[in-house]
Image (spheres, rainbow, N blue to C red):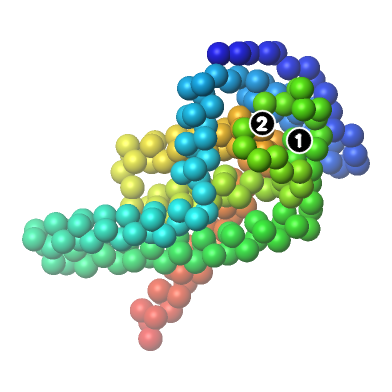
Amino acid sequence: MAWCWPPWPSLPETHVKEIFYDWGGANAWLFHAINNFRGKFVDGFMQLGTFLGEHDNFPVYLALVILTATAIVARTGTQSPQKAHREAQHWLEVIAVFSVAYVIDGALVHWLKETLDFPRPPLVFPPESLHLIGKPEYRHSLPSGHSAFAITMAASLWPVLNRYWRVGLTAFVVWVGLSRVSLGVHFPTDVLAGFLVGFAVVRLVRALVMALIRYWART
């Protein structure tokens, strides 16, 4: 396990970028603090986190959610048909939010990456100061798509989860976000931006879904 306490460099550009992206140099400093903490186990663990946070995993996660919902509703139905109906409605709302939010989140993240075109760590730092795993990418850093997808899934499922699942999914979201910095492909600000984008999309989609459900209930 290697650990190197990082310097405190800044990424010079505009004053606004210094405040909101560079955090006065803290963004680069925190990147190095996470990226320099490495070892065989850490690298493998972080690669797994990135793999689990891939947008392409959406069909697998959706299938698992549907199977879980089916099992829970079926089990509840043996006890109370009315309760099973309410349970089914809650899960349908979650599945709708997750599916629609996934589409919007993916399109929005892609548009933001292309429009903002922020540099990735391999373009900012010299190779000897960077721990990079995988193929280097140089542009379209903000926001982190993996982080946005992870929190989209967690926030979508939140209403039907118990306390233990919520803790587990929160840990999963943090794990995915840290993995993007640890592998050298994103800055902490990119990860935070991904979290904010994904969370905002879910909140918006859930509000729209609930408004539609109330409208249909009145007609």
Query: In the picture shown, does residue 120 fall above or below 98?
Result: above
Q: Residue lying farthest left?
A: 78
Choose between 211 and 102: the one closer to the eye: 102
Could you say whether the residue bearing mark 1 is in a helix, strand or loop? Answer: helix
Residue 6's quadrant in the figure? top right
Residue at left offset 46%, top offset 69%: 209
Q: Where is the C terminus found, in terms of image quarters?
A: bottom left
Query: In the picture shown, does residue 36 fall above or below 55?
Result: above
Q: Residue lying farthest front?
A: 135
Does residue 39 show up? yes
Residue at left offset 71%, top offset 61%: 111
Kind of residue at disc 2: Leu
User: How many residues crowd mark 2 within 10 Å: few (<14), some (14–19), many (20+)?
Assistant: some
CA gap, disc 2 and disc 1: 8 Å
> Which residue is the site of mark 2?
132
Does residue 26 show up? no
Q: Where is the N terminus found, in terms of image quarters?
A: top right
Q: Position of residue 207 (x, y in %)?
A: 50, 64
Choose between 7 and 201: the one closer to the eye: 7
Q: Is residue 52 left or right of residue 68?
A: right
Q: Which mark is residue 122?
A: 1
Residue 90's quadrant in the figure? bottom left
Q: Is residue 24 left or right of residue 47?
A: right
- The reply to whether callout 2 and callout 1 are in contact (CB within 8 Å) is yes
